[in-house]
Image (cartoon, rainbow, N blue to C red):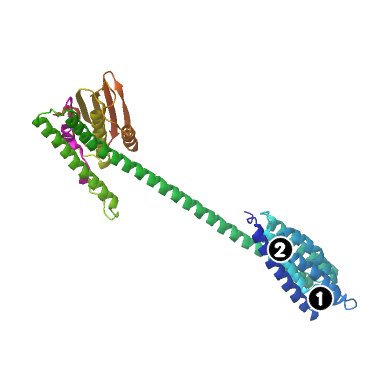
């Protein structure tokens, strides 16, 4: 991947740094020229230090743009390098031109610029070896010339390619780490949302059931002041019982929320299907009662399935207290091979809602079934409102006579 584009402030900082490097290179190059740090092709002709300073100044001018415009800087420096070679190779110019090749391969925007430069410098090195070998008629001279040319031109490009490869790998690792961090954050948010939805379902089921019973019976006592002592006593017992049970379940939920995660929650603290008898018995209204029928062989169920089944029955009976007409709510719990089926049938109310509600009960029941890959349906069927749910479970060890066992409980 190409190096990231420089911002205006970063470009200014880089230009200042490279300008300082160019000034330092010019000072060092002039010092080398003053001590004759260059080669001469002939003892007869020597252009002198003044002329040799010309390619040095041109090369140092290109260094000021080694990172902001590396390829144009290399193109600018190449003619001065050729001029220096024509006058006699200067050590300072060789080093500066090698840096220009390195900068072009590392900071060039095109990814394959290093490969192109390596091919070009290798080809020039071979040409230099051939020219020296043919012109001087010496194999040793050709090898030495090739080695000097390779170290001066090809080696900086190879170094730059290795550095760029490491930088690209580091950048890829950084991007991968950022992606993993984003995925982890998405997973965390999904987990938080799922936990909030679960808590909302639990709070709704607990509060709606118990407070609906409290509101219903307290409203009956207030609206009918001529109730006899037995009816008032019965309503107050229902109110007290639902208040105590609601507080107990709220304490259980608060305890789970405060748990530091060091221990697993106690499964016995969650409602179980064995408590449906008591739940049905508490579903009472002056003109409505409930009956529970359990079919099939009861067996040990996963905690999630048992809790979901209990909450679906609980919410269905709560809705019956709110909305059902006079009569009886029928609850059928079937232990089928590989699943638990729930059917709650209650008479339709003629006047709509008896108590106000948020409308989230059906949503919560549908979510509970969906989490367990079960099915859920609710709606009117004739003169009744019917809730049907089926939750998959592990198949029982023996289900030969599951459908032969029927138990009924009536409120």
The spot of residue 113 in percent (x, y) is: 70, 56
The answer to whether residue 215 shows anywhere in this view is yes
Report the front residue among 29 and 161: 29
- Which residue: 85% across, 75% down? 50
Residue 39, numbered label = 1
Q: Mark 2 or 1 closer to N-term?
A: 1
Q: Which residue is drawn at the image coordinates 25% and 42% (left, top)? A: 303
Question: Viewed as shown, does residue 411 lie left or right of 365?
Answer: left
Q: Nearer the viewer, mark 2 or mark 1?
A: 2
Residue 287 included in the magenta stretch of the image: yes
Q: Quadrant of residue 398?
A: top left
Picture coordinates of residue 367, whole percent (x, y): 34, 36
Mark 2 highlights which residue?
Answer: 66
Q: Residues within 10 Å of mark 2 (few under 14, many from 20)?
A: many
Q: Which residues are magenta?
A: 268-288
Q: For numbered disc 1, what is the local secondary structure? A: loop
Horizontally, residue 366 falls left or right of residue 222, namely right
Residue 301: image tag: none
Judging depth in this view, the residue of 297 and 309 nearest the camera is 309
Looking at the rendered image, the quarter that the C terminus falls into is top left
User: In the displayed image of the protein, which residue is found farthest to the right?
Assistant: 44
Vertical placement of residue 171 versus 82, above or below? above
Marker count (numbered):
2
């Amino acid at each position: 991947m190409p190096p990231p584009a420089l911002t205006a402030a970063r470009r200014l900082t880089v230009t200042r740094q490279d300008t300082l490097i160019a000034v330092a290179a010019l000072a060092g190059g002039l010092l080398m020229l003053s001590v004759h740090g260059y080669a001469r092709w002939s003892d007869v002709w020597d252009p002198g230090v003044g002329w040799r300073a010309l390619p040095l100044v041109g090369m140092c001018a290109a260094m000021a743009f080694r990172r902001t415009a590396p390829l144009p800087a290399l193109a600018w420096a190449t003619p001065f390098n050729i001029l220096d070679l024509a006058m006699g190779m200067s050590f300072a110019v060789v080093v500066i031109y090698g840096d220009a090749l390195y900068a072009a391969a590392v900071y060039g925007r095109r990814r394959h610029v290093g490969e192109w430069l390596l091919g070009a410098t290798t080809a020039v090195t071979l040409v230099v070896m051939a020219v020296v070998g043919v012109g001087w008629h010496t194999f040793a001279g050709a090898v030495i010339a090739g080695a000097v040319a390779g170290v001066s031109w090809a080696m900086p490009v190879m170094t730059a390619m290795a550095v760029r490869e490491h930088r690209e790998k580091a950048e890829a690792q950084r991007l991968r780490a950022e992606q993993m961090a984003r995925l982890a954050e998405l997973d965390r948010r999904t987990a938080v949302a799922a936990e909030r939805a679960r808590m909302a379902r639990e709070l709704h089921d607990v509060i709606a059931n118990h407070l609906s019973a409290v509101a219903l019976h307290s409203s009956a006592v207030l609206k009918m002041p001529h109730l006899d002592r037995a009816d008032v006593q019965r309503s107050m017992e229902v109110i007290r019982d639902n208040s105590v049970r609601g507080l107990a379940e709220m304490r259980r939920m608060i305890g789970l929320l405060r748990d530091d995660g060091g221990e697993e929650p106690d499964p016995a603290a969650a409602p179980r299907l064995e408590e449906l008898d008591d739940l049905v018995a508490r579903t009472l209204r002056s003109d409505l009662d409930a009956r529970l029928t359990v079919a099939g062989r009861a067996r040990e169920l996963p905690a999630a399935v048992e809790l979901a089944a209990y909450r679906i029955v609980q919410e269905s009976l709560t809705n019956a207290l709110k909305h059902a007409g006079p009569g009886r709510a029928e609850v059928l719990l079937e232990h089928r091979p590989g699943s638990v089926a729930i059917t709650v049938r209650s008479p339709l109310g003629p006047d709509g809602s008896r108590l106000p509600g948020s409308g989230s009960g059906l949503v919560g029941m549908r979510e509970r079934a969906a989490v367990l890959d079960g099915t859920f349906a609710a709606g009117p069927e004739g003169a009744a409102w019917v809730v049907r749910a089926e939750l998959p479970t592990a198949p029982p060890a023996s289900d030969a006579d599951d459908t032969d066992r029927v138990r009924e409980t009536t409120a």
